Amino acid sequence: MALSHTDTSEIIPGHGILDGEALMNLAERYSTPLYVYDGDQILKNFRAFQKAVSNLDSKVHFAVKANSSIAILSLLHTAGAGADIVSGGELQRALTAHINPKDIIFSGVGKTDDELLLAMHLGVGQINIESGAELGRIAALAASNNLKCSIALRVNVDVDPGSHEKISTGQNSTKFGLALTDGQAESYYEQITAHPNLTPSGLAVHIGSQLRNLAPFETAYNELLGFAGHLRSNGFDVPCLDLGGGFGIDYEEIMHPDFTEYGKMVERIFKNTEYKLGFEPGRSIVGNCGNLITKVIYVKQGIDKRFIIIDAAMNDLIRPTLYEAFHRIDSLAERGKDTSKADIVGPICETGDYLARNRQMPMVEAGDYLAVRSVGAYGAVMMSNYNTRPEASEVLSYHGIAHLIRPRRTVEDLIKMEINPFL
């Protein structure tokens, strides 16, 4: 059976340092595959981002889609984080973590009536609309239910962020935001201003994820500022500019992000402009703070390479298959310095079930533990139960104590979720 929710913590030896020995000890206790997060570093990263934009009137909202663990959301809340959400489910997670509805921004292109009504009843701080159809629906729901809500326009500034096409959102060819080139955005802002149930809260932009170059940010922010100035010059109230997220991380060297230059760039653009600014970092806060611990099941020698077969799979970490993403993978066993090329693959019946290909790896053996690095963002949050595999457990290390924050379900748990009408 799954571990009890009351069996939640243990002291990490060695002053709470998450070194290889500590990770192996946690793997022995909770079994693998196992996500382990460094809560102390998560808070350091968040506070570093706060400091970088502290000279501006700003609020930092954590992008819940990057890691929706209630424990991590609650930890970030202690440092003053709001939440950037993209679904009703994420809204309820943020509330469970005690984040104030006023500190929640609701984005996304396909919000349902139920999600919108929940957000309006709760009084979330801002709903970002992404189409004229959505604006019309929100206006109708607010009027018919005698509700009020604050609305921002998410604009599409048609900037290529230079990241993977599946995580690029700032171009007119994507489904996100309202184009600035056809004049409709200003018309929509006028409709918001004129509607008795809607309050214009400003403009929003988000051009993509995993940006390592500041130039696309600067281009997008200047476009946003220019449009905001245009609206103000025509008499519209534009109190806030939501600058989104997207700041990237180093997946190879696992260096924690330095937000200093980003903060200087934002300050250069927006200082003395009298806008309240919103920020939505996600990956940069948690990405390099997570490890996926997995055990080697077999080592298979193929014709031209080794296959290291592990107990983690694409259902536990889909990024390598979905985005061709790189994650550094280290052996936690002492096996000498000899290496050779290997594919690191899981048990799932798909050729695409791999965490790395053609990677130089030590001569590991069955039973050894591997650590897949930088999985704190878009790792556990994208897990599935493909091949009827229970998802990995999650552990959060904080102040030298490891807390079990999500126990692994059993196959029996998964089967109990279904209804068989033929028995």
Image: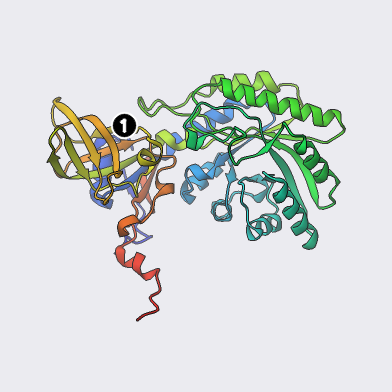
Residue for point 53% across, 24% down: 259
- Looking at the image, is 61 positioned above or below residue 265? below
Q: Residue 170: where, in percent of width, then height? A: 59, 33
| Left or right for 358, reference 118 | left
> Left of 187 or right of it: where is 392?
left
> Percent position (x, y) of residue 268?
66, 18
- Residue furthest out toward the bottom: 423
Judged from the image, the secondary structure of the residue bearing numbered disc 1 is loop
**Closer to the camera, 153 or 136?**
136
Q: x, y (%) of residue 20?
A: 25, 35
State left or right for residue 279 relative to residue 195: left
Q: Would residue 43 be seen by someone viewing this image from the given angle? A: no
Q: Quadrant of residue 298?
A: top left
The N terminus lies in quadrant: bottom left
- Kind of residue indicated by mark 1: Arg
- Say which of 63 and 333 sits in front: 63
**x, y percentage for residue 231?**
81, 31
In the image, residue 272 sits, relative to residue 364, either above or below, namely: above
Q: Quadrant of residue 190?
A: top right
Q: Which residue is mark 1?
A: 328
- Report the residue at 27% width, 45% height from top: 351
Say above or below: 336 vs 319: above
The quarter in which the C terminus is drawn is bottom left
Q: Residue at x 18, y 39 (%)?
A: 307
Q: Can I make out residue 131 in this image?
A: yes
Q: Residues within 10 Å of mark 1 (few under 14, many from 20)?
A: some
Whether residue 76 sits left or right of residue 128 in the image: it is left
The structure's colour scheme is rainbow
Q: Quadrant of residue 38?
A: top left
Number of marks drawn: 1
Compared to 423, does 206 lie above or below?
above
